[in-house]
């Protein structure tokens, strides 16, 4: 197992080789001191993407399907942040929020908008 705190020497050498080849000057001093062998993608939040939204009136449940979702994301319906009991089903990429329809302020079908936000990474609005 690799130590994630250990600098990625191969990556540093590759960057230095590229710098020498393009500029003729070594670039080791320009590298960040805490570079690790973690992929850059894990350091940033995954941007949520919504693929489907359904409100199940009979169960009082809003179901959002997509990627980059979990129980901790912020959800807005028609511009209002909503709260409610949340359950995330990772195998199906579904976030289920139990909330009465009157608290959602739902409009006619096709005129509702959902936005999911994780930190500063927000999905585009999705109409349902």
Image (spheres, rainbow, N blue to C red):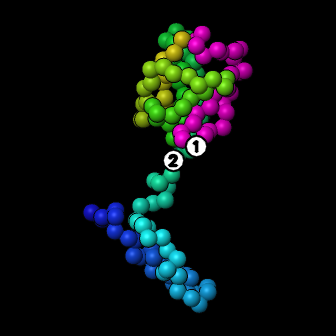
Horizontal and vertical percent position of residue 19? 56, 82
Residue 93 seen in the current view: no
Q: State the image quarter where residue 128 is shown.
A: top right
Sort mark 2 into few (<14), some (14-19) or many (20+) by Cα contacts within 10 Å. few
Residue 121 counted in the magenta span: yes
The answer to whether one can see residue 91 in this image is yes
Q: Indicate left or right for 70 with 2 as reference.
A: right
Write down the residue under mark 2: 45
User: Along the polypeptide, which appears first: circle 2 or circle 1?
Assistant: 2
Identified at 56% across, 88% down, the residue is 25
The residue identified by callout 1 is 120
Q: Which residues are magenta?
A: 101-128
In three-dimensional space, the C-alpha distance between marks 2 and 1, rounded to whole angstroms, equals 8 Å
User: Is residue 27 magenta-colored?
Assistant: no
**Which residue is found at the position 45% from the left and 60% from the top?**
39
Please name whichever residue, 125 or 30, is drawn nearer the observer in this view of the structure. 30
Whole-percent x and y of residue 8? 40, 71
Q: Nearer the viewer, residue 25 or 91?
A: 25
What secondary structure is marked by label 1? Answer: loop
Rendered-image quadrant of the N terminus? bottom left
In the rendering, which numbered label is found on residue 37? none
Classify 33 as above or below 73.
Answer: below
């Amino acid at each position: 197992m690799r130590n994630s705190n250990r600098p990625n020497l191969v990556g540093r050498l590759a960057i230095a080789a590229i710098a020498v080849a393009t500029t003729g000057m070594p670039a080791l001093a320009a590298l960040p001191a805490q570079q690790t062998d973690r992929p850059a993608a894990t350091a940033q939040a995954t941007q949520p993407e919504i693929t489907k939204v359904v409100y199940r009136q009979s169960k009082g449940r809003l179901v959002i399907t997509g990627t980059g979702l979990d129980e901790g994301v912020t959800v807005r319906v028609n511009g209002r942040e909503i709260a409610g009991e949340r359950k995330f089903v990772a195998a199906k990429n579904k976030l289920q929020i139990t909330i009465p329809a009157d608290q959602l302020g739902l409009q006619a079908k096709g005129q509702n908008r959902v936005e999911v936000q994780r930190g500063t990474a927000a999905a585009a609005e999705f109409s349902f």
